[in-house]
Amino acid sequence: MRKLLLIALLVVGLGLAFTPREELERALGWVGGEGDFDRRTFWCPMDPAIVRAGEGLCPICGMTLTLFEGGAPAESGVLQLSERQVQQAGVRLGTAEVRELAHALDTTGKLELDPGARATVRLPHPGRSVVETVRTLRVGERVEETTVLCEVSNAALDAKLAQYRVALDDYARLRRERSESGAAQALERMRGLREDLLAGGLSAAALSAWVASDEEGVLRFPVVAGRAGTVVEDSGLVAGDVLSEGARILELADLDRLWLSVELWEQDRPFVRAGQRIEFTTRAVPDRRFETTVHGVEPIVRTRTQTTRALAIVANAGGLLAPGQFVRARVTSSVGRVLAVPESAVLQSGRRDVALVAEGGGRFRPRLLELGRRHLFPGEPGESFGARDERYHEVLAGLRDGERVVVAGNFLLNAEAQFQGLLGKMIAAHEAQAGAAELAPREADALDRVLEAYLSIGAEFVADRGERLESLARELERSAREGAAAGAALRPRIESLAATASTLASASIAPEPDWDELRTSFGSLSRDVVTLLRDFRPLCVAEGELFVFRCPMAEDFGFDLWVQSSAELANPYMGQRMVDCGVPAALE
């Protein structure tokens, strides 16, 4: 067997030795001499974001990739393309300019009862009372201030009634006898008893009617609501119950005014202040947008989740809203006039932001940027609740007002520029890694397990499967908690990820799980994973170990990025409905 193998190798070697060099290079894809393999760039005309070195098929549509004939740089740091190449790349330009912009913070929240709007109706009568009649009230039913909730008999009040009648008779007799001092004492005693009876819930009209009827025996004392409101909790009273003074009769709440609490990450607190505008929607009223303003921001950040809350008062005169409803909210504030660039013009290399500046004549120069506030929208706050097509990033350094930048086709140009080494010369990969936070070995192992579980969860959503979601979410929760316990570097963000994983696990085992709710939890997981990658593992994306994509239709899920281990697009937010929806993105 070994002899046969040696003979085969010898035959192959002799064949290669006598093959003309040109044919050999053509067969091997060898070009340019001196050992450079063919690294030509190919792209998909149907989706210019699909770019690769070497021939192949588009992973989305299956079309054969087309050769992109990139030009060589005319000078150091400049990409020079012909007019045909610019058209082939689908290049479109935008402008860096001073604009009136607004900051929008999209988040979730919950409607709650106004703490001062809830009241407990209690029995005002002294001693012990016996319930004689009860008005049937359902939770959610509205009552007025004078609504009678129940009637009770009360021995202590019955005794005061008898004393009141005696005092009334004494007063009348002493007046007839013209005993002014005695009549005054009887009148004072009668007034005190009357006040006690009225305080016990007996109306003046009922007291007068009882006196006029000259009846004896038990009188029923009404218990009134004392304020208008909606029944939120019934005490379950029935006739015959024996109650003591102060016993709870009913729970009322004023639902005409509610509190809205919206969640804020700690990094979002500087952007939210009292008086800013809030728009929100709720699934209960999907065709209606509600507006209010920020009342205040809680001064404390919760340690476990690293979040705080902004609070607002919501008018609810129409009763469309209810405590306990979850909402999607947007807090907006004016940024003013700042130098800004369309967000589609910004590329990321490692942890650096880059724009391709058009210099004319097919020349494009990569330019490092220093960005300020991101994802701003044009115009004043409140012009529209829906997101516009184009957003902007504030530019602190790197561009001047009026400079033209690539806003479409830049994925292809960026791939060509990297192929020629332009960006490699500007930003070495080790600089990106040097800027990442250091992890202890135990933390790095925990982060690897977290990423593995997250990627598996994403695959379940891509396939619209739910059987393994709970076990995978529990595994992610365990790995995250181990990472938090392993050291302080990972703890703040990974604890939040653990909490979200627990929520996902619980929601996935419901008899009829809400897939929109499950995918919203996946959006929260993705937000934390993107942050972890940005802070600790930037090169795993830059070197092709992981890939980041953006879904333009994921607004309802709270976050539009996700991470996967394959370059072939597979959208976990849309699942099998639109599995190929999305575009490559950078870490944010």
Image (cartoon, rainbow, N blue to C red):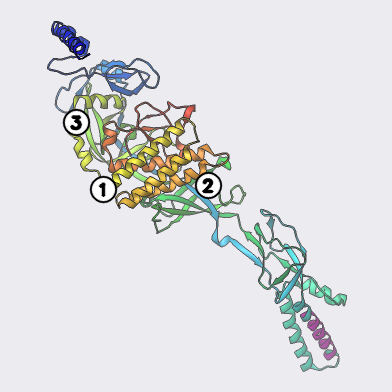
Residue 347 in view, yes or no:
no
Mark-to-mark CA distance, 1 and 2: 39 Å
In terms of depth relative to the viewer, which is nearer, 145 or 507?
Answer: 507
Residue 477 in view, yes or no:
yes
In terms of depth relative to the viewer, which is nearer, 86 or 100?
Answer: 86
Q: What residue is rendered at 30% in x and 17% in y?
A: 88
Q: Which mark is residue 424?
A: 3
Kind of residue at disc 3: Gly
Q: Please name the residue that numbered disc 1 is placed on.
A: 440
User: What range is drawn magenta here?
Assistant: 160-174
Mark 1 and mark 2 lie on one chain; the one further toward the N terminus is 2
Residue 101 coordinates in the image, percent (x, y): 37, 41
Kind of residue at disc 1: Ala
Secondary structure category for the residue under label 3: helix
Residue 55 coordinates in the image, percent (x, y): 29, 16
30 in relation to 217, above or below? above
Secondary structure category for the residue under label 2: strand
Residue 560 coordinates in the image, percent (x, y): 41, 36
Q: Please name the residue that numbered disc 2 is placed on.
A: 326
Q: Is residue 76 left or right of residue 278?
A: left
Mark-to-mark CA distance, 3 and 1: 29 Å
Q: Is residue 46 magenta?
A: no
